Every structure is written in structure tokens, then in C-alpha cells.
Image: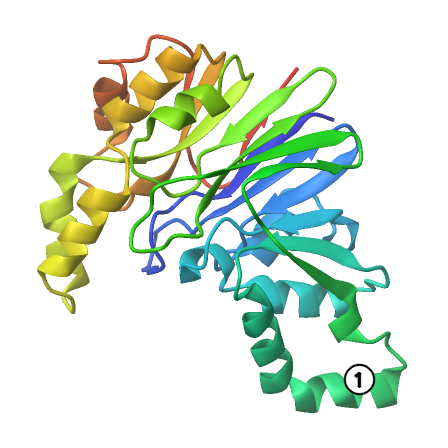
């Protein structure tokens, strides 16, 4: 099976009744099952996609905004209680180890109890955390290329390309439009790019209600308008484009038609407007 599943497609950490869940993406290529990002709801999303939590081969975290790693600890703990007994390599920015140590400390009563009372393996050792850096690495049969993107004020924020012998997938991560993205995605079978509808920012900021103009400034300087995502896909010559991390995604005044109309200004190929649980085959 070679496919990408968009487990959570909402941009930002807040959820409300009826909204989608924050970011997590499942990449299944060449027999490997890889999770990219672990936003709220990822454990349920994996199960709904038919993937046992114990079957993950690796986890990659693109950056340390909460909507991309809030549920990493609970996911690993839940996989542990479901029978996980092998270490999982986890790649993420500097500081991810601090999160993991804090999670273990917060859950120490439960973890230590289960070690004594149930004979579980040491949870701490099941997470093998490595610092993610720009460059290339091999993960089994896959080559992974990591590109530092533009997501201020965070510096350690990354886009990822997965290459196998027959398929290629690029995940933009959270980013403003950058020229290097088209180079990273050149000729890929699928580009999953974050996207924003600029016309929806006013309503989004008003709905949040407990921020100030800095929220708008962050959104506008750190994310990619849908038409720009289309332009990057066209320039890269990718086969298919999927929009993900949608901002906004829960405003009834902005529908899938708005996303399609905006993106079609610059992209004429196959287009997927991300929804939670969407499976995109690579064959």
C-alpha cells in the first residue's frame, strides 16, 4: 500500500463543536508506516484509518507549535498500553526531548504503577528521539529530504520529501511561500501544501476573541495563500496537489468552492481539498 492519509487538516490548535482536528499526516510507502506530526486527535485518527498504534515505524514532527505535537506523548502512552514493545524512532526539532521528559514526569504515577503492576516495558526507552536537521537521511528503503521552511517566529520548522524507488511525496509543513519549496517538490507524485484563504482571516481573528493584532500578523507572514500553493505546485511540476492545514476550515462562509476557485487561478491539475481521514493513493 502506497498512500497518504490526511488525519487532521485544521490549521491551528483550537477545536469547537463540528470542527476538524489539528494536523497529522500518515505516510505509507514501501511497507513503512510513518506519522508526520501529532496534533490533537491523532490517536483516534490513526485507528479510524485502520492503523494500529503499535504498527508505527517512525514519527516526524515538523515544528514545535502545539497543533503539531500536542498529542505525541498521549499517542506513545496509548500505544504502550496497547502493546507497543519496540522502540520508535522520532525525529523532531531541538526541544522535543524536553517535551517528552515533561510528559513522562507528568505521568510518572501512572507509568511507574504500570511498570510495577503490569510488567510493561520501560516507556521512556520506547521513544528514540533524534534532532531533525536540514539535509537527507535514510529510513529503511525511503530517502527523506528535510528543508528548513519559513514559519516565523519559529526557526526550526521543516518541509519533508519522501522518495522511494517508485513514488515521491512532499509535505510543506507550516510555511510562508518560499522559492525552495518548488525545488524540493520537483516532479513529485503528490505535494501536500498548507493553505490559507486570505479573505477569511478577519472572521477567524474575530472568532478567536482572546488575541490581538499579532495573531493576524502571524497568520499573514507565516502561512501560504491558496493561490501561492497552486503556483508552487505548478512551478514544481507535481502530479497532484492537496491543500492541508486549512486556515480557516470551520467558517461556513467559506466552502470547498472558495478553496477550489482560489487555487485554480494558478493550478490546473488534480486538486484535493483536505478533509480529516482523506486517503490519497500514490499508485
* Mark 1, other Cα within 10 Å: few <14 / some 14–19 / many ≥20: some
Residue 145, relative to residue 240: is it above or below? below
The answer to whether one can see residue 22 in this image is yes
Residue 228, relative to residue 267: is it above or below? below
**Along the viewing direction, whichever of 281 and 196 lies nearer the viewer:** 196
Residue at the image position 61 percent from the left and 21 percent from the top:
168
Residue at the image position 33 percent from the left and 54 percent from the top:
12
| Left or right for 44, reference 108 | left
Q: How many labels, in total?
A: 1
Residue 110, relative to residue 28: is it above or below? below
**Along the viewing direction, whichever of 34 and 119 lies nearer the viewer:** 34
Looking at the picture, how far across and down is residue 135, in whole percent? Answer: 58, 37
Image quarter hosting the C terminus: top right
Image quarter hosting the N terminus: top right
Name which quarter of the figure residue 71 lies in: bottom right
| Left or right for 86, reference 176 | right
Name which quarter of the figure residue 88 lies in: bottom right
Looking at the picture, how far across and down is residue 93, in whole percent? Answer: 53, 56
Looking at the picture, how far across and down is residue 77, in whole percent? Answer: 69, 70
Secondary structure of the residue carrying tag 1 is: helix
The answer to whether one can see residue 251 in this image is no
Residue at numbered disc 1: 114
Residue at the image position 71 percent from the left and 23 percent from the top:
164
Looking at the picture, how far across and down is residue 130, in whole percent? Answer: 66, 57
Judged from this view, the residue extending furthest toward the right is 119
Residue 137, relative to residue 82: is it above or below? above
Residue at the image position 63 percent from the left and 42 percent from the top:
49
Amino acid at each position: 500500500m502506497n498512500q497518504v492519509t490526511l488525519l487532521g487538516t485544521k490549521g491551528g490548535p483550537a477545536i469547537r463543536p463540528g470542527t476538524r482536528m489539528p494536523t497529522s499526516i500518515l505516510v505509507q510507502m514501501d511497507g513503512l508506516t510513518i506519522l508526520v506530526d501529532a496534533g490533537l486527535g491523532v490517536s483516534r485518527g490513526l485507528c479510524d484509518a485502520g492503523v494500529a498504534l503499535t504498527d508505527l515505524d517512525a514519527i516526524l514532527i515538523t515544528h514545535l507549535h502545539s497543533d503539531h505535537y500536542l498529542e505525541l506523548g498521549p499517542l506513545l502512552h496509548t500505544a504502550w498500553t496497547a502493546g507497543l514493545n519496540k522502540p520508535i524512532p522520532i525525529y523532531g526539532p531541538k526541544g522535543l526531548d524536553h517535551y517528552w521528559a515533561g510528559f513522562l514526569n507528568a505521568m510518572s504515577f501512572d507509568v511507574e504503577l504500570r511498570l510495577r503492576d503490569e510488567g510493561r516495558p520501560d516507556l521512556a526507552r520506547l521513544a528514540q528521539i533524534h534532532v531533525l536537521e536540514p539535509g537527507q537521511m535514510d529510513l529503511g528503503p525511503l530517502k527523506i529530504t528535510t528543508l528548513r521552511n519559513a514559519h516565523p517566529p519559529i526557526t526550526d520548522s521543516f518541509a519533508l520529501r519522501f522518495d522511494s524507488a517508485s513514488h515521491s511525496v512532499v509535505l510543506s509543513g507550516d510555511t510562508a511561500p518560499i522559492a525552495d519549496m518548488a525545488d524540493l517538490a520537483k516532479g513529485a507524485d503528490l505535494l501536500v501544501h498548507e493553505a490559507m484563504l486570505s479573505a477569511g482571516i478577519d472572521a477567524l481573528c474575530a472568532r478567536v476573541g482572546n488575541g490581538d493584532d499579532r495573531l493576524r500578523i502571524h497568520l499573514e507572514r507565516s502561512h501560504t495563500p491558496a493561490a501561492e500553493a497552486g503556483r508552487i505546485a505548478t512551478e514544481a511540476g507535481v502530479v497532484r496537489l492537496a491543500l492541508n492545514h486549512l486556515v480557516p476550515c470551520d467558517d461556513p462562509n467559506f466552502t470547498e468552492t472558495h478553496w477550489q476557485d482560489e487555487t485554480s487561478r494558478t493550478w490546473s491539475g488534480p486538486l484535493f481539498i483536505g478533509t480529516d481521514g482523506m486517503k490519497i493513493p500514490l499508485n
